[in-house]
Amino acid sequence: MNRLINRIYYRIKPLIPRETQIQWRRLAIAMQKQKFREVWPILESAKQAPSFWKGWPEGKKFAVILTHDVEHQGGHDKCRQLLELHRKHGFVSLFNFVPERYTVDPQMRKFITDNGFEVGVHGLNHDGRLFSSHHLFRARSKKINRYLREWGAVGFRAPAMHHNLKWIHELDIEYDLSTFDTDPFEPQSDGVGTIFPFPVSGKTPQETYVEMPYTLSQDFTTFILMQEKSTDLWRKKARWIIENGGMILLNTHPDYMFFGDGEQGSEEFDVSLYEDFLLFLKENYAGQYWNPLPREAARYVRGMAESPPDASPGINTMLLPFIVNLREILSFIPQEILIGAA
Ligand SMILES: [Zn+2]
């Protein structure tokens, strides 16, 4: 049903003036906010660490993973400024580009990776149809895999957070970012219900990838649709994630950030809000967080999930194969629940 509504929405969307679309979405969110207060922004059960979890590297308390989806040419052209902002405060991040929607300058990709940041792939052409049929997904995944290879990228995020974790196995990736812990305002609103990354096992080890859900509301939802004037919403959720040793994974868009050039657009927020959140982390939690590139986080998580469980003294090692099997079975359950909706 959801898929049908999405399909209809994307078909008629070009006919509706953008300003009207925004007004509708503002109204819908304002009405839904109360209804979802038990599950958003905090879903209490999402704090439970997965069974394989052994903690973040070097005893860090939590992780900060910063990602950006670059929607249009205008966003592409603001990437240098956004990268510099991170460098100024000692953070690294990921820039996801849409290969066939605007010109992705190879020099821009080089600038990003030369500076120790990461480049990823965001859909193919961002028309909302990527998951409309398995046939179409398969055809497009071949092209996406070509861009992944060409760009030296190992990560993917689908446009509009559409996802089918089973089909995503067909992409040659180490991690996927197309989900969230809880976000009932997304068009495909089935969250994965965890603030921790987790592996999604395929038929072969090559097919296995790590899923990393975003855990703070997206910038557009927060500042444009909900019209928040501060980072209080992010801070509140971040404190809860930190308390539970989870992952702060944020998805922001250079397109919607106003860097002070010309006049501020109606769909832009002042970049000082984003900077304010980086400062909140830096000033209050210095030394307590791990801020890896997503590819580093994915490799760490995969290694942790695949290493045998700690054999504490007293456990009969004859039982270990059984324990490993049981863990595999248990880790398989959430996946099935997830793909059930697709
Ligand atoms: Zn997008």
Image (tube, rainbow, N blue to C red):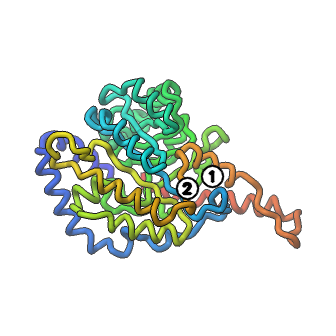
Residue ID for mark 2: 197
Q: Helix, strand, or loop for circle 1? A: helix
Camera-side residue of 98 and 137? 98
Q: Residue at x 56, y 43 (%)?
A: 295
Q: Residue at x 16, y 63 (%)?
A: 27
Three-letter residue code for mark 1:
Val
Q: Do the residues under discs 1 and 2 have CB atoms within 8 angstroms?
A: yes
Residue ID for mark 1: 301
| For residue 125, above or below residue 218 | above
Whole-percent x, y for residue 48 in the image: 56, 70
In the image, taking residue 14 as reference, residue 184 lies left or right, namely right
Name the quarter where the N terminus is drawn: bottom left
Three-letter residue code for mark 2:
Pro
Dot 1 beta carbon under 8 Å from ligand 1: no
Can residue 40 be seen here?
yes
Which numbered disc covers residue 125?
none
**Quick one: label 2, few (<14), some, or many (20+) residues within 10 Å?**
many
Camera-side residue of 246 and 171? 246
In the image, taking residue 18 as reference, residue 67 lies left or right, namely right
Q: Helix, strand, or loop for circle 2? A: loop
Whole-percent x, y for residue 162 in the image: 38, 47
Q: Give the mark count.
A: 2
